[in-house]
Amino acid sequence: KRVCIFCGASGLSGEHFWPVWAHDYLGLDGSSRVSELHTSAPLAGYYEPPTVRKKNSHLANKKLRVVCMRCNNGWMSSVESDAKPLLLPLIKGEAFLLSKADVATISKWIALKIIISEHENPKNQVTPREDREKFMRDGVVPSYFDIRIANHSCTSQVGFFRKTWTILVARGESPPKPREEFPVKNIQDVHFIIGSLLVVGGASRSNIRIGEMFNVVPDALPRISVSYTHL
């Protein structure tokens, strides 16, 4: 039986990933249908065939039943209400100067979205229960989260991508040995679009940071014009 990812209560409530109040600014023309690709490679040398889920619904209507009604209508609603006036100009692509307090408020909202998205597929969660409880209780964004925002030039106003993996690092000459059971995911990369706002969130619970892992060839990346602000 699935329980709330924050407080452990039963009676789950559907949480809109893209807030209903934002739908008026997302250009919902009916063309962005939900088509989700899920794939996982838990151990080196092992391949799990991808699964695809399709729904005849706009992506912006996506709900995740991973939190209870009390959390959803309580402290989570407060996080949403605090962030809404700051998010609106960013969603609409307007110039907006953020104070340090504004950055903290938006970061908390983004962290909430990242944590919720982890539990669409529970085996791919990265944030441990103790950190989720601390976030609920004290509003503390995990220290291993890396959050950035940008104004983008894509035609789409709604989009989502999430990838998780496990990196085992050993010092010295001996390579790390993976555990026999399904390993805990310790790295994630989350991108989502809401209106003119592009959010890029990463989390690394390994002993190396995301930026130290790979050298990416620029020509291999899609051409997206963005200007990042590191939160």
Image: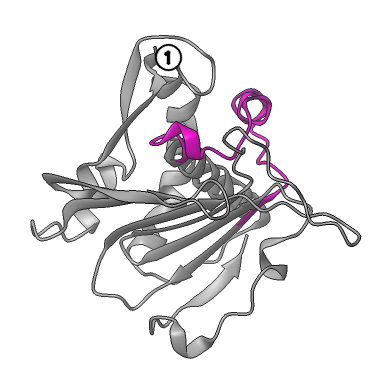
Q: Is residue 36 left or right of residue 177?
A: left
Q: Residue at x 56, y 51 (%)?
A: 165
Q: Residue at x 46, y 42 (%)?
A: 113
Report how many numbered discs are placed on residues in the image: 1
- Under tag 1, what secondary structure? helix
Colour convention of the picture? one colour
- Residue labelled with disc 1: 70
Where residue 172 sits in the image (x, y, percent)?
Answer: 91, 60
Q: Residue at x 39, y 11 (%)?
A: 1
Where residue 103 sits in the image (x, y, percent)?
Answer: 60, 54
Label 1 packing within 10 angstroms: few (<14), some (14-19), many (20+): some
Query: Is 203 within the magenta?
Result: no
Where residue 178 sits in the image (x, y, percent)?
Answer: 68, 44
Looking at the image, the residue that sits furthest to the front is 45
Which of 39 and 24 lies nearest the eye of the viewer?
39
Which of 123 and 59 lies nearest the eye of the viewer?
123
Q: Residue at x 67, y 55 (%)?
A: 100
Q: Dividing the image into 4 quarters, which one contains the C terminus?
A: bottom right
Residue interval drawn in magenta: 118-146
Which of 162 and 78 lies nearest the eye of the viewer?
162
Q: Is residue 218 above or below residue 59?
A: below
Query: Is 126 within the magenta?
Result: yes
Looking at the image, the residue that sits furthest to the right is 172
Residue type at mark 1: give it: Arg
Where residue 220 sits in the image (x, y, percent)?
Answer: 45, 85
